[in-house]
Amino acid sequence: MASDLFTTVPIESVVGDFCRQSAMKFATISELMAFLELREGWQAIENWEELSDLEIFRMCIAASIPHGPVSVISEASYREGLGAFQIQAERLTQFAAMHSAIFSECMFDGDLLILDGNGHVAWAFHHEGMYLVFDSRLVI
């Protein structure tokens, strides 16, 4: 059941917490995404529109997810009454597999951001079919 899988919190609260923990000075998701879009390391996913959420998740995110809580900000997060989805990292595969059934839209359809609860790593998926794994500890 979805209510057992995640809770929701305001998006800007999650982004603010992540940025404070990582010592980045961004106040909004727009500022954080603009910063990430300028980073090197984006990788294209061939034929991404033909892949399932689970296939994309396994391809670009699953291998580097930490343990503990993470926050997922998908297009569904912007619906009234929702927000960032807080979930245990160990259950992200299940969340990716169920996202379409729960929200009637693909998880990897628009921009997607996954933030680790420790404020270190951000996984970003761009609506043009590219992804980035960003570790704030490696920024000098």
Image (cartoon, rainbow, N blue to C red):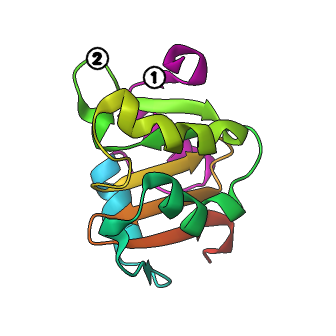
- Taking the magenta stretch, the answer to whether it contains residue 4 is yes
Amino acid, disc 1: Thr
Identify the residue shown where x is 55% and y is 24%.
6
The residue that label 1 is drawn on is: 8
80 vs 10, nearest the viewer? 80
- Taking the magenta stretch, the answer to whether it contains residue 104 is no
Expressed as whole percent of the image width and height from the top left, the position of residue 107 reads 38, 47
Mark closest to the chain's N terminus, 2 or 1: 1
| Magenta extent | 1-28
> Which residue in the rendered view is the most extreme toward the right?
67
Q: Is residue 131 visible?
A: yes
Q: Quadrant of the C terminus?
A: bottom right
Expressed as whole percent of the image width and height from the top left, the position of residue 54 reads 52, 53
Identify the residue shown where x is 23% and y is 28%.
79
Identify the residue shown where x is 36% and y is 78%.
38
The secondary structure type at the circle numbered 2 is loop
Expressed as whole percent of the image width and height from the top left, the position of residue 16 reads 46, 40
Q: Separation of disc 2 and disc 1 at Cα?
A: 9 Å
Q: Residues within 10 Å of mark 1 (few under 14, many from 20)?
A: some
Expressed as whole percent of the image width and height from the top left, the position of residue 71 reads 53, 39
46 vs 117, nearest the viewer? 46
Confirm or deny contact between disc 2 and disc 1 (CB under 8 A): yes
In the image, taking residue 16 as reference, residue 94 lies left or right, namely right
Q: Is residue 16 visible?
A: no
Q: Quadrant of residue 27?
A: top left
Q: Residues within 10 Å of mark 2 (few under 14, many from 20)?
A: few
In the image, taking residue 131 as reference, residue 109 lies left or right, namely left
Q: Quadrant of residue 22?
A: bottom right
Amino acid, disc 2: Gly
In the image, taking residue 20 as reference, residue 83 lies left or right, namely left
The residue that label 2 is drawn on is: 81
Q: Quadrant of the N terminus?
A: top right
